Image (cartoon, rainbow, N blue to C red):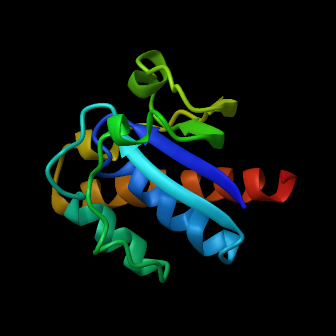
């Protein structure tokens, strides 16, 4: 089974949404994980909310440190934020391919609740399209 690790800084929004989307698209044919270079304390509540809107439940997910995966092997390590791409650690396990797909940080959105929701939806939809394209190429 192919193994994929999705990385961002906090593992609280983008990488969690990407993990949820990738799992839903792969129908159990891929082993998918997500982690952060500086993991937060919880998955962002708005990420959970916008994922539920498309029928994906990530409410039981939690941020994990990339450190726990450094000795494992992956077919792909996908970074979804520029910071994680720049500080992506060395994996002692084999990594066949490293891919960068940069997305804006929706957690940095400002404004009223609707403006923040809209930013999360936009990023979710961008991630969804990118993950669909990635899976289609496998």
* x 26%, y 45%: residue: 107
Residue 118 is situated, as x and y percent measured from the top left of the image, at 36, 59
Percent coordinates x, y for residue 45 in the rendering = 21, 65
Q: Position of residue 30 (x, y in %)?
A: 67, 64
| Quadrant containing the N terminus in the rendered view | bottom right
Quadrant for the C terminus, please. bottom right
Q: Position of residue 111 (x, y in %)?
A: 18, 48
Residue at 44 percent across and 59 percent down: it is 17
92 displayed left or right of 109: right
Residue 28, image quadrant: bottom right
Decide which of 117, 128 is in the foreground and name it: 128
36 is higher (above) or lower (below) than 48: above
Residue farthest right in this picture = 137
**Vertical placement of 109 versus 81: above or below?**
below
> Residue lying farthest top?
86
Tag count: 0
Q: Is residue 40 above or below residue 99?
A: below
Instruction: Give me the residue at 49% from left, 38% from top.
Output: 103
């Amino acid at each position: 089974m192919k193994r994929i690790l999705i990385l961002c800084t906090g593992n609280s929004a983008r990488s969690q949404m990407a993990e949820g989307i990738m799992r839903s698209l792969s129908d159990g044919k891929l082993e998918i994980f997500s982690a952060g270079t500086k993991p937060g304390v919880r998955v962002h509540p708005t990420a959970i909310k916008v994922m539920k809107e498309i029928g994906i439940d990530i409410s039981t997910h939690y941020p994990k440190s990339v450190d726990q995966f450094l000795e494992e092997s992956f077919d792909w390590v996908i970074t979804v934020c520029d910071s994680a791409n720049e500080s992506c650690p060395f994996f002692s396990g084999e990594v066949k391919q490293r891919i960068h797909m940069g997305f804006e940080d929706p957690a940095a959105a400002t404004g009223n609740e609707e403006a923040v929701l809209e930013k999360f939806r936009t990023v979710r939809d961008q991630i969804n399209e990118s993950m669909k394209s990635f899976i289609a190429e496998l």
